[in-house]
Image (cartoon, grey):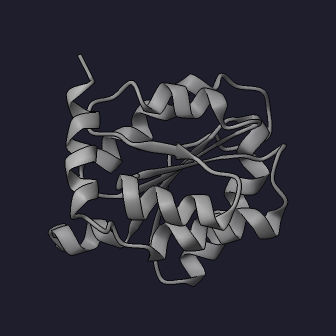
Amino acid sequence: MHKATPKDFEETIVFGSDHAGFELKQLLKKVAHEKGYQVIDCGSYSPQGVDYPDYIAPVVQEVLKGAMGVLICGSGIGMSIGANRFKGIRAALCVDGLMAKLARQHNDANILVLGERLLGKDEAISCLEAFLTTPFEGGRHARRVEKLEALIV
């Protein structure tokens, strides 16, 4: 039996969406899988109407173990508000690849949040690729991330 190692989690991407993000989630899961990442899908599993808060905690639990996360709803706003209520989570709502790159580079974001109704497929793929390939820069940014964590009460 294979025991999970930290490297396994670095290469794991966990996805969650509501019905409004379902189609984009399916596409991005395929892209991630094709790039060699292990994919975990925490739902929803169809385009039938659901409540987006139900899909945040399962993704957060995996991210806190070391996976990278992606949450998708219609606008991305609700998912980002919900995810950022958890200590240790830095969820970034991004609308282009540069935002996703900076979210990783400067904020050590560990969940990418997207709004399916606001992004084209190519832009969403650009966000995912930038998010997954950009390392945290550390340095002066590490101090700022520590201060963000201290804000959670």
Q: Residue furthest top?
A: 153
Q: Position of residue 49 (x, y in %)?
A: 78, 27
* Position above or below: 111 against 82: below
Q: Position of residue 139 (x, y in %)?
A: 21, 64
* Position above or below: 58 against 7: above
Using the image as rendered, state which of residue 3 and residue 152 is in the foreground. Answer: 152
Picture residue at 46% right of the left edge, 42% below the top: 91
Q: Residue furthest front?
A: 140
The number of discs equals 0
Picture residue at 27% right of the left edge, 23% below the top: 152
Quadrant for residue 134, please give it.
bottom left
Q: Quadrant of the C terminus?
A: top left
Picture residue at 33% right of the left edge, 28% below the top: 86
Q: Position of residue 123 (x, y in %)?
A: 76, 65
| Residue 13 showing in the rendered view | no
Using the image as rendered, state which of residue 90 and residue 70 is in the foreground. Answer: 90
Picture residue at 68% right of the left edge, 55% below the top: 25
Q: Position of residue 150 (x, y in %)?
A: 20, 29
Is residue 69 shown left or right of residue 118? left
Is residue 35 shown left or right of residue 38? right
